[in-house]
Amino acid sequence: MPDLNIIDFSELQSMPYQESCVTVGNFDGVHRGHQAILSEITRRGESRNKPFIVITFFPNPAYYFNGYKQGFYLSTPEEKETLLKALGAEKVLTVKFDRDFANLTPREFLSTLKEKLAVDLLVVGHDFTLGRDRQGSIAVLKSLGEVLSFRVDVVPPVILDKGEISSTAIRQYLDEGKVGAAAELLGRSYAISGEVVHGSDRGSRIGLPTANISPWPLKKLPGVGVYASHVYLEGNTYQGITNIGYRPTFEEQSLPNMETHILGFDGNIYGKEITLEFIKKIRDERKFSGVESFLAQIEQDKADAHRIFSYDQTQAHLSSKP
């Protein structure tokens, strides 16, 4: 479990605000739809000179009710808080989602926000609901807002050519290995961070050193395959090829492994924190007849990755031109 201050809603402390702007949601991945909500509440909060507070949850209600075991979250709680604050949130309150919280009525929840946070404006997405049995529809929120003396504003969905942006759609794209499509909905490349740990060391023995990365177990991995990836390590950026899979050529694993060969790099980075950004899938993982055929394919993967990075850099250069 990541180290984050997760609060019990029943123990929410009063904030020293006369009035505040508040938004509530899961915000998993902080994708472009979420960013639209944050942009709107930042604009309105600044115009009213009021602090902007985000209330989010851990675990995610979908995770809590459906009992997922691993590979669900698009962002760790820390990543989510960092992204939300970068978008203007003065404070991010991560509330423990449990049975007691799930059983709150919309009025109980909103009355607490009024009492503890002095909410004057509540901004939510168009499909937002809250409270026991999802009773807190937009209409109910607005009605309670009138009673409790705060305004409710609704931000419309962000629609792209691929349809409405959602965390569910991003997870589907990642499952399919479509990391470019996921990035379009996120507004940035999908990234995973973790510690470099010891593996079998087979890669070094055959002339292909790889960094085995141990991410947060609940972080969503892209689908099994080989990807061109940007590698961030100790303030430096490298290019790499990342394999997510079961290493069938050498062993069969019960859970997918994530390892990266950093192009042009050969150093001891065990115990270091590393971040991978997934740029494009190169190919599916497959079983090879032996080491020679495996290494020959890796050389082809490197060539494919170089072409992907070259194209990526060209597109970035073109888009930056006035």
Image (cartoon, grey):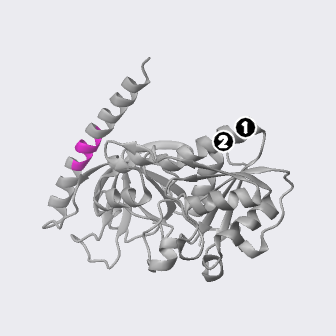
Residue depicted at 49% across the width and 53% down the height: 275
Q: Quadrant of the C terminus?
A: top left
Q: Nearer the viewer, residue 167 or 48?
A: 48
Q: Quadrant of residue 175?
A: bottom left
**Disc 2 residue type (three-letter):** Thr
Dot 2: element: helix
Magenta segment: 301-306
Measure how far apart labels 1 and 2 are at the Cα level.
6 Å
Q: Main secondary structure of the magenta part?
A: helix
- Residue position for label 2: 42
Relative height, residue 99 to residue 27 (above, below): below
Relative height, residue 240 to residue 27 (above, below): above
Q: Is residue 279 visible?
A: no
Q: Nearer the viewer, residue 322 or 141?
A: 141
Residue depicted at 45% across the width and 43% down the height: 187
- Residue 274 in magenta? no
**Disc 1 residue type (three-letter):** Glu
